[in-house]
Image (tube, helix red, strand yellow):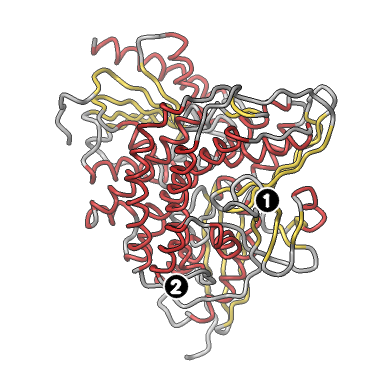
């Protein structure tokens, strides 16, 4: 794991991953959009899920929270919380995200390249519908609300 | 070899952007069936665009693909500008080329280093490759980042750039704002040169084919945004004639439509088509590098497309530097125009090949009809044809090796199936 160094950006950085035109695949983006409306003090960014871009986004960050939709046959809206510094990500969970060099591969590659943030927390929201179209299904909508609350608690706890 | 019925079943195709499915069946040592199954979001986006304002098309279509948003924006703005009867020239046109350079660098480098090179070096994926070749992977990551920086600077954002509009840009930069990028591009050009040398040393299966290559062609430049649509077998048309010359066939096993040349069948779009049809328009450095790599001025083996892609990255770095050096800030960020009803069609060269958009708008600029044909659905039939040719020559390979080589044959096309589908599962079935 990386040690915190002087050039690393302090503070928690939120990365929402997904595609808003794929119904529940947009869950990560929706979390970021809601946090942006609620809190100006939290730094957030939206990403498509392309892995190299993700690696670049979290490089030299101290604490990153990433939110993405996942598909693991659990009940829609189930929240998966993973500490990516300590446990491997199931690759097939994130296949619903845009590309094959995606979240899981970016975490593994960052590990090899020694560019993982000191803390990388991943919130995976179990999606229900990934067909083309806009809007989240009700269970995912509720999960988004829970994640927004949890992220605020994490940020407040660290300040 | 003893004759037998085999069903090769592979139900996952790795390192192809997005997901889809491939199914191959072999009976009595003959390939009896090849089906590439993909689903097609552009169909959804075509419907989604109807009733929207013409100004929304670049940003909405940019969401079709996380890898090539610029291509969708460029085809959209050019088609809209045709419908509105306007032309974007001078530095604004150059900035569009610069933006496209950024996307080619980003997209090609991702494919070369993260998705395709592991095939040739015998690794399961780029992560495994990085364990042994950290410096090489680092070069790929940095090179791709330079592409991101161009897109971010000119497009306003790395992902789904927001600065592009019909008629030009929302905001244009002063010349001095490119100073840092210029230095980065000089490094990138050297890294791209190394990439050509590196990829050209890979071991390629012999697989030259007789394809009909289709790409844009422009008298003065290697094609990005403009040109006539030509082929090596006599096609020479304007974009508005596309639908008179190409037909999309519905195929039962896939949601995607197979695009074919009417009366001629499958064709080949992408880096190899551009390279073979436009070699003379490459920069001197790119041409020299192509010759030194052993590729020369033509390439008919799709397994060598990784080298051609590397040459295009080198060209994109060179072209980006040329544009930045000659750039002068335009007086205004976009051209003025009146909204009018009309129909406009345009093709631009997405990293993976020709990307066709056509729009019909009314007198208030509302979109009445939209048509989008991505490069991957144009290459779909050619990919299947390659597998029909490739598999019979390699039937003696063990199941796992044959499967891997089939996946590699598909990856030759860098299929951006997320442009054309969401989920990809690959089934190679031997019975």
Instruction: Identify the residue position indicated by label 1 in the image.
Output: B227
Q: Look at discs 1 and 2 and give the one toward the viewer.
A: 1
Chain identity of mark 2: B
Q: Is residue B255 visible?
A: no
For residue B305, above or below residue B173: below
Q: CA distance from mark 1 to mark 2?
A: 40 Å
Quarter of the view holding residue B73: top right
**Is B191 placed left or right of B323 in the picture?**
left
Quarter of the view holding residue A11: top left
Q: Residue at x 43, y 27 (%)?
A: A16
Q: Earlier in the sequence, mark 1 or mark 2?
A: 1
Could you tell me residue B219's position as x and y percent? 65, 55
Could you tell me residue B126's position as x and y percent? 33, 53
Q: Nearer the viewer, residue A141 or B410?
A: B410
Q: Residue at x 80, y 68 (%)?
A: B263
Instruction: Say yes or no: labels 1 and 2 on the same chain.
Output: yes
Q: Nearer the viewer, residue A106 or B260?
A: B260
For residue B353, above or below residue B202: above
Chain identity of mark 1: B
Q: Nearer the viewer, residue B142 or A104?
A: B142
Could you tell me residue B39's position as x and y percent? 63, 49
Quadrant of the frame with the C terminus of chain B:
bottom right
Which disc number belongs to residue B2? none
Q: Secondary structure at mark 2?
A: helix
**Is B412 placed left or right of B360 in the picture?**
left
**Is A122 placed left or right of B222 in the picture?**
left
Q: Secondary structure at mark 1?
A: loop
Instruction: Identify the residue position indicated by label 2 in the image.
Output: B402
């Amino acid at each position: 794991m990386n040690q915190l160094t002087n050039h690393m950006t302090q503070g928690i950085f939120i990365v929402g991953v997904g595609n808003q035109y794929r119904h529940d695949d947009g869950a990560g983006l929706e979390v970021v959009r809601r946090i942006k409306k609620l809190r100006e003090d939290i730094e957030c960014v939206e990403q498509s899920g392309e892995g190299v871009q993700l690696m670049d986004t979290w490089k030299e960050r101290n604490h990153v929270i990433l939110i993405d939709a996942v598909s693991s046959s659990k009940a829609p809206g189930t929240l998966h919380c993973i500490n990516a510094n300590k446990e491997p990500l199931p690759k097939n969970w994130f296949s619903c995200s845009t590309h094959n060099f995606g979240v899981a591969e970016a975490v593994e590659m960052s590990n090899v390249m020694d560019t993982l943030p000191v803390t990388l927390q991943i919130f995976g929201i179990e999606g229900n519908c990934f067909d083309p179209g806009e809007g989240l299904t009700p269970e995912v909508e509720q999960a988004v609300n829970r994640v927004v609350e949890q992220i605020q608690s994490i940020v407040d706890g660290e300040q | 070899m003893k004759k037998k019925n085999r069903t090769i079943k592979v139900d996952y195709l790795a390192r192809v952007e997005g997901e889809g499915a491939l199914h191959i069946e072999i009976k009595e040592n003959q390939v009896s069936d090849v089906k590439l199954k993909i689903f097609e979001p552009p169909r959804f986006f075509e419907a989604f665009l109807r009733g929207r304002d013409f100004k929304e098309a670049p940003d909405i279509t940019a969401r079709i693909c996380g890898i090539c948003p610029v291509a969708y924006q460029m085809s959209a703005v050019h088609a809209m500008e045709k419908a509105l009867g306007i032309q974007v020239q001078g530095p604004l046109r150059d900035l569009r080329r610069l933006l496209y350079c950024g996307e080619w660098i980003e997209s090609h480098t991702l494919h070369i280093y993260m998705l395709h090179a592991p095939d040739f070096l015998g690794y399961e994926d780029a992560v495994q490759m990085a364990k042994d070749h950290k410096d090489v992977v680092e070069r790929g990551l940095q090179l791709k980042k330079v592409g991101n920086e161009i897109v971010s600077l000119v497009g306003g954002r790395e992902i789904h750039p927001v600065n592009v509009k019909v008629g030009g840009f929302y905001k244009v930069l002063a010349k001095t704002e490119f100073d840092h990028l210029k230095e980065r591009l000089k490094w990138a050009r050297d890294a791209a040169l190394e990439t050509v040398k590196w990829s050209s040393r890979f071991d390629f299966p012999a697989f030259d084919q007789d394809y009909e290559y289709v790409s844009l062609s422009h008298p003065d430049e290697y094609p990005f945004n403009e040109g006539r649509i030509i082929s090596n077998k006599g096609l020479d048309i304007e974009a508005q004639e596309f639908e008179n010359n190409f037909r999309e066939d519905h195929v039962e096993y896939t949601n995607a439509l197979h695009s074919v040349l009417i009366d001629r069948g499958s064709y080949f779009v992408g880096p190899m088509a551009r390279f073979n049809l436009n070699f003379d328009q490459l920069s001197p450095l790119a041409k020299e590098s192509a010759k030194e790599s052993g590729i020369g001025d033509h390439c008919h083996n799709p397994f060598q497309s990784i080298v051609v892609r590397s040459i295009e990255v080198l060209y994109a770095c060179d072209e980006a530097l040329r544009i930045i050096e000659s750039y002068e800030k335009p007086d205004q960020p976009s051209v003025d125009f009146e909204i009018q009803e009309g129909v406009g069609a345009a093709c631009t060269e997405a990293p993976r090949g020709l990307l066709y958009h056509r729009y019909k708008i009314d007198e208030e600029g509302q979109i009445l009809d939209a048509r989008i044909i991505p490069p991957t659905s144009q290459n779909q039939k050619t990919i299947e044809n390659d597998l029909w040719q490739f598999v019979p020559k390699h039937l003696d390979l063990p199941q796992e090796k044959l499967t891997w080589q089939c996946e590699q044959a598909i990856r030759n096309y860098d299929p951006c199936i997320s442009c054309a589908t969401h989920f990809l599962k690959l089934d190679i079935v031997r019975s």
